[in-house]
Amino acid sequence: MSNRPFVISTDSGSDLNQSYCQENGILCLELSYTIAGETYTSFDPRMTNKQFYDLVRQGEMPVTQQVNPQQLVDAWEPVLQQGNDILHLGFSSGLSGTFNSSRMAAEELREKYPEAIIVTIDTLAASLGQGMLVDFAVKMKKDGASMQEIVDWMEANKLNMVHNFTVDDLNHLQRGGRVSKATALVGTALGIKPGLHVDDEGHLINISKVRGRKASLKWLVDRMEEMVGEWENEEIFISHGDCLEDAQFVADEISKRFGITKFTIDYVGPVIGSHTGCGVVALFFMGKQR
């Protein structure tokens, strides 16, 4: 690899907020979504996360659009023209076509800028699981790691990024094909809350059924106890679909059980929230391979 400076790139599937990206010099490609007849990008000032979830509660059904290759070319080309290489940490190819767009854009730009190095990594991660991997890359870069060292660490450790989710509303998972209509109907009637994870192919998989909201939140912490293994997590990332109190409950349970005190808690953004609905709580940590 070259000794040229490099820029870390990601996309809004990571659920990193705009201020974090700006403060850390991250180039973040915005996926888009359509709700109530209007199309927005992830950081669109016309629609806050809170406003988005309020519309979903009112019955609006959003749909999402991936980033296309030309958008990536347009975003990356100025970076290359300034003499930088690019390290892109992309949204799981098992959940979106956006990563494939990044590969196509990289191929096109390598032909035009043969001296440039563009590395695209399929994180096989989503939401703040992807965001946590980006945060590791940011910290490694600040500590003086080369782009190659970060790439090697990512490829060796990305499957140790454990994702566990629970949702409050099965209808959005049913609409996205994650659970059957019959399962959604019965589950809703009985107060069944699914526990899900992202597998090593980057797909969202239903792995547990728990009755009642509090039990499903405790399942997230039980699952962490089962999966954390030898990893010592200094910080835990939690994302939520406009249910901060539930996310904080999970953080408090983790503090009691593991003694961890540092948390990043933020919204599941509209792109992923379009598929999980209000009330999703997702927990991310480094642990045993998924």
Image (cartoon, rainbow, N blue to C red):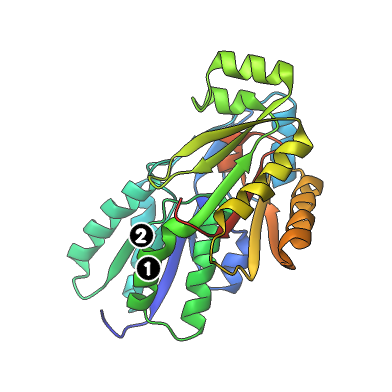
Q: In this view, does 30 lie to the left or right of 23?
A: left
- At 29% from the left and 54% from the top, the residue drawn is 103
Q: Identify residue for label 1.
A: 87
Q: Position of residue 60 (x, y in %)?
A: 66, 26
Q: Position of residue 179 (x, y in %)?
A: 53, 24
Q: Position of residue 112 (x, y in %)?
A: 20, 65
Q: Position of residue 121 (x, y in %)?
A: 35, 59
Relative to 161, residue 212 above or below: above
Q: Nearer the viewer, residue 121 or 49?
A: 121
The quarter holding residue 255 reads bottom right
Query: Would residue 256 be seen by someone viewing this image from the given angle?
Result: yes
Q: Residues within 10 Å of mark 1 (few under 14, many from 20)?
A: many
Q: Identify residue for label 2.
A: 121
Q: Which of marks 2 and 1 is nearer the N terminus?
A: 1
Q: Is residue 3 left or right of residue 242?
A: left
Q: Which of 44 and 239 is in front in this view?
A: 239
Marks 2 and 1 close (CB-CB < 8 Å):
yes
- At 57% from the left and 28% from the top, the residue drawn is 173
Q: Nearer the viewer, residue 259 or 284?
A: 259
